[in-house]
Amino acid sequence: MLGIDTRRITPDNRANREQRQQLPVLVAHLLILWETKRMSIPNETLQAMIRLYHGFALTDDELELVRPELDSYLKEVEKLRELDLANVMSGRLLQAQEGGTP
Amino acid sequence: MADTALVTMTISELAPKIKAKAISPVELTEAVLAQVDRLQPTLNSFITILHEQARRQAREQEAALMRGEYRGPLHGIPIGIKDNIATAGIRTTVGSKVFTDYVPEEDAYVVSRCKEAGAIMIGKENLEEFAAGSTSNNLHYGAVHNPWHLDHIPGGSSGGGGANVAACVTFASLGTDLGGSVRGPANFCGVVGLKQTYGRVSQRGLLVTSFNGDHIGPMTRSVRDSALMLQAIAGYDPLDPSTVPVPVPNFSALLGQDLRGLKMGIPSNYYFDIIDPEVETAVRQAISALEALGIEAREVALPSMQYAGALRIAGMADSVVTHEPYLATHRHDYGPTVLYRTLAGQFVLGRDYSKALKVQRLIKEEYARVLQDVDFLVTPAAPVAAWRIDTETVVLGGTAYPVRGPGAGMTARCTSPSNATGLPAMSVPCGFTQAGLPIGLQLIGRPFEEARLFQVAHGYEAVSPSRQRRPPLVEA
């Protein structure tokens, strides 16, 4: 068990500064990210993600090389913040019309 | 010495002559191999050239013809295969060092279908490393050059195929298209590129690909040839769950039919938002030409496209999963561009991946709604014409956009939405820049209505300013 607080982040249950210091570094940094809408994730957070989730190791120099793609990802995520996707069904295949055309 | 008269013909011109035994597959293959040998040092469009196998296949096809076993329009036609499509007994590198010695035991489904149709495989064509990019400037196998301007890119990732078809080295090439990798090179090289409906053609044997949105499609020198190629490779494959069991129609059935009464949608947002003025002018002129052919133009809005950038999120996550086994064992064999672009995907959160799939669904539904009011959409195939091989950024409207490596999404912004929707889309040449670089028009149709796209594209092709134009090096 990693002891990660999985409660939904809302104004009512948002962790205060003291609580945050006791959380794993990954969650703390993500909270900071969400709260301040920062468009970049600190290297320590990325290194923690790699370590905790058995990712591919990257040096700090290499992290700078993935950063443009990562920043672009965060920018796109930010655009989705106000978009309600709760009731959108996911789907991959097109529904083919039997018989097709012509 | 290549026989220019032979190599510049189209498949549909050659087929009746081969059937009538007026042109021999052996003679045709020798003419093509001469063109290959003359232009490979200039274009670098192949990774592996199959001289002896092509000659053997040509002899076999000629013998079959003599026995009265005509196999259809591809009988005796030399074609190229992108080097991420498996070919039994022939190395398939995926443009990478990781697969440099990989020899598949089985042909990809589409390769089998082309062989059954009598096509002759000339070689495995150069591409971007792991088909991940739009320049075909390959770190391991060298840059492919655009036949119209040798210091410019041919587009990617199927750049070898685009260059070969334009330079009359092959009559058709099979490429793969995950974000525009068939339509992009077709656009930049001034040929016809098709990404048919997702599920129309089997992806079995397409190597190191994504779970979501990859397609194998043809590049040809005419719309009619594109229909012939699709006819050969389309169909349900029980071993590929992505294929859809729908009937395969005659894709040439509507060619030459009147276009009057059709309706085309011109997107009022997204596709023309970031565009080079020369490209926009050419595409708008093409739209006017389509109107002159009797097609009604309607402006259509696609508001969900403001979220189109999110589609890349799913691609990032898919990519790192696809590459996982190779990154674990051969990380040092990756070029830095692909390596670091891929590794960024390991940071994508599951929540965001799910959101990306839902955005994909939103966009898909929006296109479906729009295509109830119009028969097809018309857009540019790319925001810019081919840039120089050594270019890192392109400036449009005062903004610099990366065209290589991380953040290079601008290059595929017109093509990649159709990979997400799965809708059929094709690039058709519609003119040239003042510098003499090709410009392409993109037509996007309803699911499984490729025949309609061919009808429109064929009608436009006859009036396009690109008709009958070839790169000068074809005949040099």
Image (cartoon, rainbow, N blue to C red):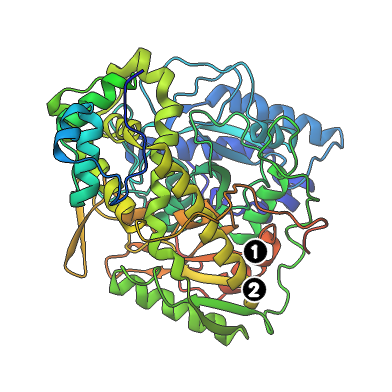
Q: Residue at x 73, y 32 (%)?
A: B61
The image position of residue B44, as x and y in percent, is 36, 36
Q: Horizontally, is B172 left or right of B416 in the view?
A: right
The image position of residue B47, as x and y in percent, is 42, 29
> How packed is label 1: few (under 14 Cα within 10 Å), some, or many (20 or more)?
many
Residue that badge 2 annotates: B375
Q: Is the residue under label 2 in contact with that under label 1 (CB below 8 Å)?
A: yes
Determine if residue B176 is in view. Answer: yes
Q: Which quadrant of the view contains residue A64?
A: top left
N-term-proximal mark, 1 vs 2: 2
Q: Horizontally, is B270 left or right of B263 in the view?
A: left
Foreground pick, B440 / B66: B440
Q: Which quadrant of the view contains residue B340?
A: top left
Compute the Cα span from label 1 to label 2.
7 Å
Determine if residue B99 is in view. Answer: no
The amino acid at mark 2 is: Asp
The image position of residue B373, as x and y in percent, is 63, 78
Chain identity of mark 2: B
Chain identity of mark 1: B
Q: Above or below — where is B384 with respect to B50?
A: below
The image position of residue B453, as x and y in percent, is 63, 65
Foreground pick, B365 / B65: B365
Q: Horizontally, is B355 left or right of B256 in the view?
A: left
Instruction: Identify the element where label 2 is drawn.
Output: loop
Q: Which quadrant of the view contains residue B113?
A: top right
